[in-house]
């Protein structure tokens, strides 16, 4: 009786374990169909499903596997809606803006021309949302976000107007008159991600300049001095860029227009040896230009 009970318990446990992450096994047996974009989505979501499965996160593995199978069936698969996730309140505007930017790109049908690039952007965005909800692996959050940003930049460049040669004359696709690019600088105390007093005026000036553009692009780049490791300063530069981005959004800058970057202790304003504290290097640069 005791052995019978033991095997019954083991059998029940096996059924539970088989149910966890079971979608991944189903998705692996699927032959992806649909458009090249949907096939690329299948591949991207399968990578995410496998990564989460290997971490023991079977719930998110199943979610990604389900999206992979939907794409493989030729269904329309959109990126996650951030409002449906339990995200930190201060991250919601950035993620909502990022999704709007992605959906605006998809609305042009560019995924038919750049299937791999758009699929990379979408799967990176969903990865970013999922990791941001967990909010316990900053390196993973940054990796997903940076892949999304990089993919979108590639798409933007490949969608840009190009010169056309006709009868040995260069004809440039017409673009609206562009304002000059302009940069605004915000400074920080040592090892701090809180802008110094008076920074609000500089950010407000940037927000006002943005309004002069029909289709603005705002790059917010964080920098540090050379004290500390590369890894630590990359994270500090990221926090500084986010702090300025949130202030800018409060002043009316659309989140979907913002691209955040961290250069850490690279590209110093004042060239100094490693390990040198320098106030001028502790900064965020907001660059406003026409897209």
Image: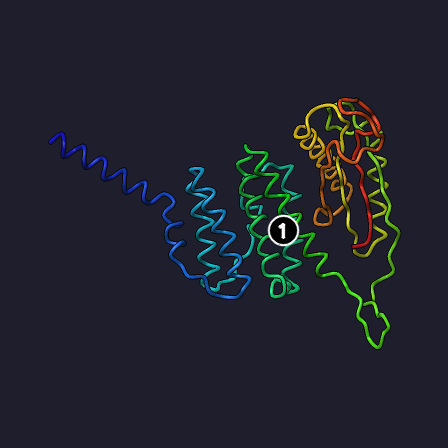
Q: Which residue is depicted at the point 52% across and 61% down?
A: 38
* Residue 280: image location, x then y, percent: 84, 28
* Residue, disc 1: 99
| In this view, 158 is above or below 251 | below
152 or 97, which is in the foreground?
152
Please tell me which residue is depicted at 23% across the width and 36% down the height of the picture. 10
- Give the quarter of the figure containing the C terminus: bottom right
| Furthest-bottom residue in this view | 167
What is the total number of numbered labels drawn onto the structure image? 1
Instruction: Give left or right: position of 76 versus 278.
Output: left
Q: Nearer the viewer, residue 157 or 90?
A: 157
Percent of width and height locating residue 232: 67, 28
Secondary structure at badge 1 equals helix
Q: Residues within 10 Å of mark 1 (few under 14, many from 20)?
A: many
| Residue 92 percent across, percent down from the top left | 63, 42
Residue 91: image location, x then y, percent? 63, 39
Which quadrant does the N terminus fall into?
A: top left
Figure coloring:
rainbow
Residue drawn at point x = 70 percent, y = 52 percent: 153
- In the image, what residue occupies the spot 49% across and 63% down? 75
> Can you say whether 162 is above or below 43 in the image?
below
Of the pair 104 and 34, the residue shown nearer to us: 34
Q: Quadrant of residue 114?
A: bottom right
Vertical comparison of 34 with 261: above or below:
below
């Amino acid at each position: 009786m005791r052995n019978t009970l033991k095997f019954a318990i083991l059998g029940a446990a096996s059924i539970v374990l088989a149910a966890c992450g079971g979608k991944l096994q189903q998705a692996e047996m699927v032959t992806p169909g649909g458009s090249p974009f949907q096939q690329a989505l299948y591949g991207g979501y399968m990578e995410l499903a496998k990564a989460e499965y290997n971490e023991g996160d079977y719930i998110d593995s199943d979610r990604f596997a389900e999206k992979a199978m939907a794409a493989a069936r030729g269904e329309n698969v959109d990126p996650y809606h951030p409002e449906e996730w339990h995200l930190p309140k201060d991250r919601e505007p950035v993620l909502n803006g990022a999704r709007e930017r992605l959906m605006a790109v998809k609305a042009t049908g560019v995924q038919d021309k750049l299937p791999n690039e758009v699929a990379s952007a979408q799967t990176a965005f969903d990865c970013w949302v999922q990791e941001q909800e967990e909010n316990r692996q900053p390196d993973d959050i940054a990796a997903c976000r940076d892949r999304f940003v990089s993919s979108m930049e590639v798409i933007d460049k490949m969608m840009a107007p190009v010169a056309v040669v006709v009868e040995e004359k260069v004809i440039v696709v017409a673009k609206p008159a562009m304002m000059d690019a302009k940069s605004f600088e915000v400074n920080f105390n040592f090892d701090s991600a809180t802008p110094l007093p008076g920074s609000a005026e500089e950010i407000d000036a940037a927000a006002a300049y943005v309004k002069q553009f029909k289709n603005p692009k705002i790059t917010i780049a964080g920098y540090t001095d050379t004290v500390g490791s590369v890894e630590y300063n990359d994270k500090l530069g990221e926090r500084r860029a986010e702090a300025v981005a949130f202030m800018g959004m409060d002043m009316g800058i659309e989140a979907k227009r913002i691209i955040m970057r961290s250069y850490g202790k690279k590209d110093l304003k004042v060239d100094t040896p490693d390990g040198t504290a320098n106030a001028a290097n502790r900064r965020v640069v907001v660059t406003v230009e026409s897209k």
